Amino acid sequence: MAKPLELGVAQVHSFDSNPAVYAADKDFLSLDLTAGERVMVRVTSLTNTLTLLELYDGQGHLLSPVGETQLSWKPTEDATYIVGISPLTSTFGCAADVGYVVVAEIPEIRTVYLPLTMRNY
């Protein structure tokens, strides 16, 4: 069950299960997105936590963008997408020990027009 991730709203998470005793913790967050609208998901560590970000479609199939601190992609269809966040090391604990902040945003797209110079030879 993926917790919803709202655009522009930061969430604090942590990896709280001991991987020596339980399966390593992995957080799943869902995003409802519109086709063609670029989205960026960024993770900022609170405690030097190293993360791995993976993108899944609504059926749980792994998609191509993967990153350690951010994912950026343009959905090809209106759908629910899932972001999986897991630790790259076997650390665990509360947010004060292995915490991170995750936020999804629609990045501002800037159009820059440059002068064009042509020469006739």
Image (cartoon, rainbow, N blue to C red):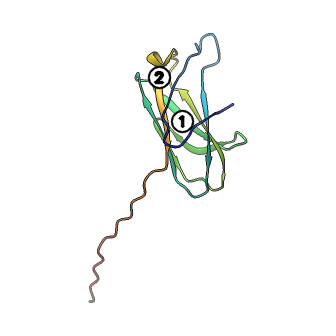
Q: Position of residue 102 (x, y in %)?
A: 49, 34
Secondary element at image label 1: strand
Q: Exactly how many numbered labels are in the figure?
A: 2
For residue 99, which numbered disc appears in the image?
Answer: 2
Disc 2/disc 1 C-alpha distance (Å): 15 Å
Q: Position of residue 41 (x, y in %)?
A: 50, 41
Camera-near label (2 vs 1) is 2
Label pair 2/1, CB-CB below 8 angstroms? no
Closest to the observer, 33 or 68: 33
Q: Residue at x 64, y 44 (%)?
A: 81
- In the image, 92 versus 34, the foreground residue is 34
Residue 86 falls left or right of residue 121: right
The residue closer to the viewer here, 12 or 14, is 12
Residue found at x 50% / y 21%: 89
Q: Earlier in the sequence, mark 2 or mark 1?
A: 1
Which amino acid, mark 2? Gly
